[in-house]
Each structure stands twice: as C-alpha cells, then as structure tokens.
Amino acid sequence: IQIFGHLEPLDILRLSRTSRDLRNLLTSRSSEHVWRNARLNVEELPSLPTDLNEIQYAKLVFDAICQVCGTHCHSVYWDCRIRCCQKCARQTCVLFCSCKFLSLLSVAQAVGLQTFTPSRAL
C-alpha cells in the first residue's frame, strides 16, 4: 500500500475501480494517507477544501464525468463542489448551489467560473 502513495490521485481512482478488494482497501480510513500523498504528488493542485475528504476531492478534480448526467466533461464548479457539463450546469447547478446557500449572482456566473484542469488528461 505504500507504493500507492507514489502515484497520482487519478491512478488511485482507477485502481480503486479495478476490484472490490482494492476499492475496500483504498477507501478505508486507514488509506487516507495514500490519497493525501498522491494529492501532494500533483504540482499546482489547489489545496484540499475543508468540506471535502481526500477521495471526494480526487473524484471532483480528476474524474472527467458529469456528476449529473454521466457524460464526459472537464468543468469543475468549485462554489458548488460539483463537476458537470455546461448543459447540466445551466439546468441543475442553480438548484444545487441555492441549496448550499450561495448568492444568486454566484450561481448565475457558474458557467463562467474558473475551472482547474489537471495536466494529465483522461
């Protein structure tokens, strides 16, 4: 398991999806250090938000799947803590973000928010 800490989060996400045993191992609390070390292996990655754990953060940053419709996308809307395509951002991010008590101005600008795209594409 120490070897996993030398990988990047995307690698660990992929490994965690290869078998039930690996998923159970890599998603256990005892493996949090693996995810943290993997995150630290990525240069210029924004800091871990206090409201997300390491696995949630890795999924948000490195999964290239819209969390609403499942299509391929690259947009992360940090205020909403969601990855979604522009179509879903227009249709659902307003509802999602308003539930998180964000201002309507912030929600209206969601499509234009800065996104972080990892240098390693999927």
Image (cartoon, rainbow, N blue to C red):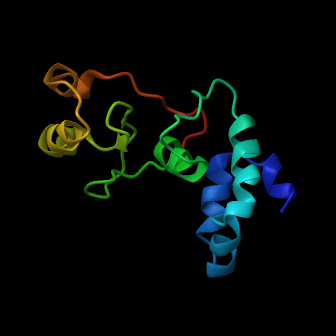
Q: Tell me where residue 57 appears, x and y as whole percent.
A: 53, 44
For the point 82% across and 47% down, the residue is 6
Whether residue 1 sits left or right of residue 51 in the image: it is right
Indicate the quadrant where residue 112 lies. top left
Q: Tell me where residue 71 appears, x and y as whole percent.
A: 31, 54
Compared to 32, does 112 lie above or below? above
Q: Nearer the viewer, residue 95 or 72?
A: 95
Q: Residue furthest right?
A: 2
Indicate the quadrant where residue 16 lies. bottom right
Q: Tell me where residue 38 appears, x and y as whole percent.
A: 73, 45
For the point 22% across and 33% down, the residue is 101
For the point 50% across and 44% down, the residue is 52
Q: Residue furthest bottom?
A: 20
Compared to 39, does 66 lie above or below? below
Indicate the quadrant where residue 43 lies. top right
In the picture, which quadrant includes the N terminus?
Answer: bottom right
Whether residue 101 sits left or right of residue 39 in the image: it is left
Compared to 65, does 46 lie above or below? above
For the point 55% across and 41% down, the residue is 121
Whether residue 56 sits left or right of residue 28 in the image: it is left
Compared to 121, does 103 lie above or below? above
Q: Nearer the viewer, residue 30 or 40?
A: 30
